Amino acid sequence: MKILVVSHYFWPETFIINDLVTSLSGQGHEVVVATGKPNYPEGRLFAGYKAAGVERETFNAGIEVVRAPMRPRGTGGAVNLTLNYLSFVSSGLWHFPRLLRGRAFDVIFMFAPSPITSAIPAIFLKWRKKAHLAIWVQDLWPESLAATGFIRKPWLLKMVGWLVRGIYACADTLLIQSKAFHAPVARYARADKIIYYPNSVDEAGLSDDGGDAIPDELASLLETHFCMVFAGNIGKAQAVETLVGAALLLKDLPDCKLVLVGSGSMLAWVRERQLEDGLDNLVLAGRFPMDVMPQIYRRAAGLVVTLKDEEIFSYTIPSKVQAYLAAGKPIIAALNGEGASVVIEASAGLTCPAEDAQALARAVRTLYAMPPSERQHMGAAGRAYFLEHFEMHRQARRLVEIFEQRITPIGGTI
């Protein structure tokens, strides 16, 4: 099958689409990726890339990647993000058709975390290529814009809702990463387009064999203390205030550390609180490549996932949940809804309400007091659940089956 993947984000940025593309290619499908210039999450371009001009490169020995120029997201804020979003749309509409001229595809597969506006170039390519368009919905718009405070004016949220309705109308298939997404997405699209297709993780990427060694100081800390690791974006949606609040309540356990691995818009705020409150038990480890993360997971006592207490986030299963399950470590999920339900169903750890620092601290104490054998049992149960429900290669095969069932023969190419 010939698959064109359109994504605002792609390698060397760390997103699950990287591994899914690799798996699809490994199963014999011809995959081309159309994307922008990598700059997430720091807001500046990765080394070796320039904001201006188009680029072609090869990913994982055989996957063609075409890149359109894009304005980096900078240090955040509504203006910078809006310009970043709009630049991908305008640049993609102009450059992707020329970069892909004469190429035929069976399906255009749009990876759609925020912003959903990134689907606009994919819609144009659908019309030009006369191909089936599948959008993999990772985030709910306009609800997430309201929940994060990015947009507050009701009339503007209503306009975004109209935009979402138009984008969904142009899609032939809408894949949703959580079963709870069905009702919100169905408010803007026909229900017969919607198919549950969860996020997955490539187990090979979680091997402890690859990547540079983690710093000795971090390795020593993880090996000599009871460390609960939070990995990923340190932003508003992740309710990192809850982690700081829990750290305050856990200061009486000197052997227990909360280790935050990653970066994001709230990192400076966390660092400020760490210094002001003397939180020696809150460790900001920095950001590491994905191939290094297994070394950190292996040494952790447990893994933590948090989200804000907003209805929109109760529908979401954060991608790190799948990675945590695959790592075989007990999980504390300080969130509501679908993500917590997965941890409970898998018997993979403990849950507590979102944005409840006291409940999170109690959960950490509970895990801390458990016999190691009980924690190991939780981790093993989570891993078994991952292999059954979220393993990448199985999910890649299922994706192709969905395409084969739903696509119509392409009518030509331009």
Image: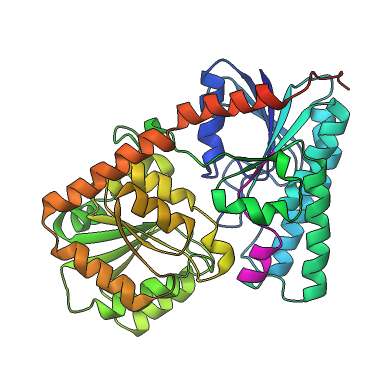
Q: How many marks?
A: 0
Give the residue at x 17% y 64%. 368
Q: Residue at x 79, y 62 (%)?
A: 160
Give yes or no for residue 157 being in the magenta stretch.
no
Provide the residue span drawn in magenta. 135-147
Choose between 267 and 390: the one closer to the eye. Answer: 390
**Quadrant hosting residue 412:** top right
| Residue 281 appears anywhere in the view | no
Q: Decide: is 215 above or below 159.
A: above
223, 242: nearer the viewer: 242
Report the side of 92 relative to 248 (left or right).
Answer: right
Give the residue at x 80% y 48%: 167
Q: Where, by quadrant of the figure, is residue 254 drawn? A: bottom left
* In this view, 88 is above or below 108: below
Residue at x-position 18% and y-position 54%: 220
* Residue 7 visible in the picture: yes
Position of residue 309 relative to residue 341, above or below, is: below
Which quadrant of the rendered structure holds the N terminus? top right
In the image, 86 versus 142, the foreground residue is: 142
Residue furthest out toward the top: 28
Residue 7 in the image, given as x and y percentages of width and height: 67, 41
Structure colour scheme? rainbow
Q: Position of residue 383 (x, y in %)?
A: 31, 40
Q: Which residue occupies the extreme front position in the image?
A: 192
Specify whether residue 136 is painted magenta. yes
Q: Quadrant of the C terminus?
A: top right
Residue 300 percent location from the top left of the image? 25, 53
Q: Position of residue 173 (x, y in %)?
A: 71, 37
